[in-house]
Amino acid sequence: WGEMFAVLPFGNTTVIFTLTGAQLEQAFLNGFTPACNPSFTGGTGRFPQVSGIRVTYACNGTTPVVTGMWKTPQGIGGPETPIAPADTIRIVTNDFMFTGGDGYTVFTQASDVKLVGDVLLEVAIDYVKANSPVAPVVQGRIVKQ
């Protein structure tokens, strides 16, 4: 499991919370900034990794623009429900991101917060054990237009 620790070495724990569609869009704009602005100095680790949703974006010069967001509870290729600004969505992330890490300060405005506290490394190891062999593929959850 040394490879797993190499990817998740920080001891982060899980947090579940609710965002509005408008807040989710703000989070995506933060995450897409390095992809649109090669000279951005705030770090590239902020590019989002998602599941259960699909998002499209474009670059207006060096500024990211979210062009669509959808809930995809059955995965890519299944039914999609558009996420409007006033809609709400449950998010699971790690405590570093929840407290504003990598510029995700919008997460600190979340509601219905549950500090679950599961260690992310252990969650990932349990998933791999239960689903081995794991065969990751690009699914088109995030698409730059």
Image: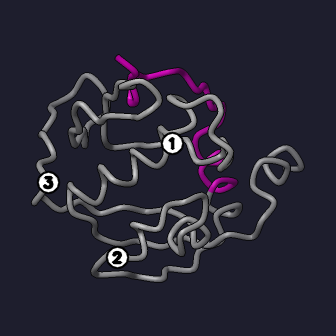
Mark 1 or mark 3: which comes first in sequence? 1
Q: Residue at x 77, y 48 (%)?
A: 7
Mark 2 or mark 1: which comes first in sequence? 1
Mark 2 or mark 3: which comes first in sequence? 3
Q: Residues within 10 Å of mark 1 (few under 14, many from 20)?
A: few
The residue range painted magenta reads: 124-145
Queried whether the magenta region covers residue 126, the answer comes back as yes
Give the image location of residue 129, x and y in percent.
67, 48
Which residue of the protein is positioned furthest toward the top in this rendering?
A: 145
Helix or strand or loop: what does disc 3 sit on? loop
Q: Mark on residue 49? A: 1
Q: Circle 2 sits on which residue? A: 109
Q: Residue at x 42, y 24 (%)?
A: 61
Between marks 1 and 3, how big is the CA–CA gap?
Answer: 20 Å
Q: Residues within 10 Å of mark 2 (few under 14, many from 20)?
A: some
117 vs 42: above or below: below
- Quadrant including the C terminus: top left
Helix or strand or loop: what does disc 2 sit on? helix
**As drawn, is 120 to the left or to the right of 36?**
right
Between marks 2 and 1, how big is the CA–CA gap?
Answer: 20 Å
Q: Circle 3 sits on which residue? A: 85
Give the image location of residue 67, x and y in percent.
24, 30
Instruction: State the residue in front, 136 or 133.
Output: 136
Instruction: State the residue in front, 139 or 33.
Output: 33
Amino acid type of disc 3? Pro
Q: Quadrant of residue 143?
A: top left
Q: Residue at x 54, y 21 (%)?
A: 137
Amino acid type of disc 1? Gln
Helix or strand or loop: what does disc 1 sit on? loop
Q: Residue at x 41, y 68 (%)?
A: 107
